[in-house]
Amino acid sequence: MDTQVKQRVCGLLGGIAYASTADYYNQMNQLVSKFIPGHSSRIHIVSVDIFQYIETLNNSQWAEAVEYLLEGVHQLVKSGIDFLLICSNTGHIATPRILEYYPKLVLLHISDAVAFAIKEKKLKKVGFFGSKFAMVSSSCVVERLIQHGLEIVFPNNDDMERVHQIILDELTINVITEESKQFYRNAMQRLYDEQQVEGIVLGCTEIPLLVKQSDLPHIPLFDSTQLHAQLAVDYQLGRYDIDSFLPPNIKKVE
């Protein structure tokens, strides 16, 4: 075992939802163990209550939702983290406020991880599935993808509504049904056929619990959880510089 390996300490802001947060933890540890056998990932986790968070979003209390997430970040920063991951696409609404409060904090944005993978495959036009809070061009995650020069396409209105309800009513509490699996597969195939997208972003960290690449092998799927966890470990172990992932118009914090 290499006892000289240095790792940056990762802070995970989780609980939104708990199943995907566990996915982050497991995937990061598996990756660290792969790159440096015998080691595990240095991670601090703060898990917030998803009920309180979703309530504020449903009531359009955006500022309250952001401040609630910021409370969790305060705990992580006090614990001595070197960088932060928000284990939720929609949770990135708090990014501007977090960086306003902690301007020197390295926050690895989930959309940067996704965009890097899409651009590596030299794709441009991709579909996006997520919560209704994320499936708009002005959302914090989609706007960031657009900054990377990508064209983002959403499901039709009926599909969008059901995509959101399945996330909210089932996936956030780790309920997986065959009916919902089949709906997601059909909706993704529909978007692929009707809009000629080149791939689809699983833009909610719970969706990979429901849909896998093997379900739609002919459509490139971009698992935001897996890609975010990969970016975290690459940064944690110093395998990549953060500049490699940022949009062209954004500079990293010095």
Image: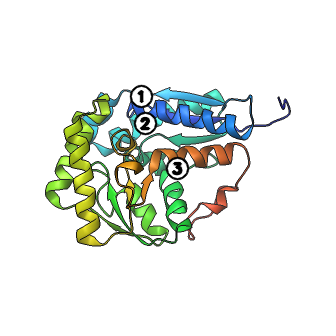
Frontmost of labels 1 and 3 is 3
The image quadrant of residue 91 is top left
- Which residue is denoted by mark 1 in the rendering? 48
Q: Viewed as shown, does residue 6 lie left or right of 55? A: right
Instruction: Work out whether 142 lies above or below 132.
Output: below
Residue picked out by circle 3: 227
Q: Is residue 60 visible?
A: no
Mark 2 or mark 1, which is nearer the start of the sequence?
1
Horizontal and vertical percent for residue 97?
Answer: 47, 47
Tell me the quarter of the image containing the N terminus: top right
Cβ atoms at labels 1 and 2 below 8 Å apart: yes
User: Looking at the picture, which amino acid does disc 1 mark?
Assistant: Val
Horizontally, residue 160 falls left or right of residue 10, namely left
Taking depth in this image into account, of 183 and 224 the one nearest to the observer is 183
Q: Secondary structure at mark 1?
A: loop
Q: Is residue 122 visible?
A: yes
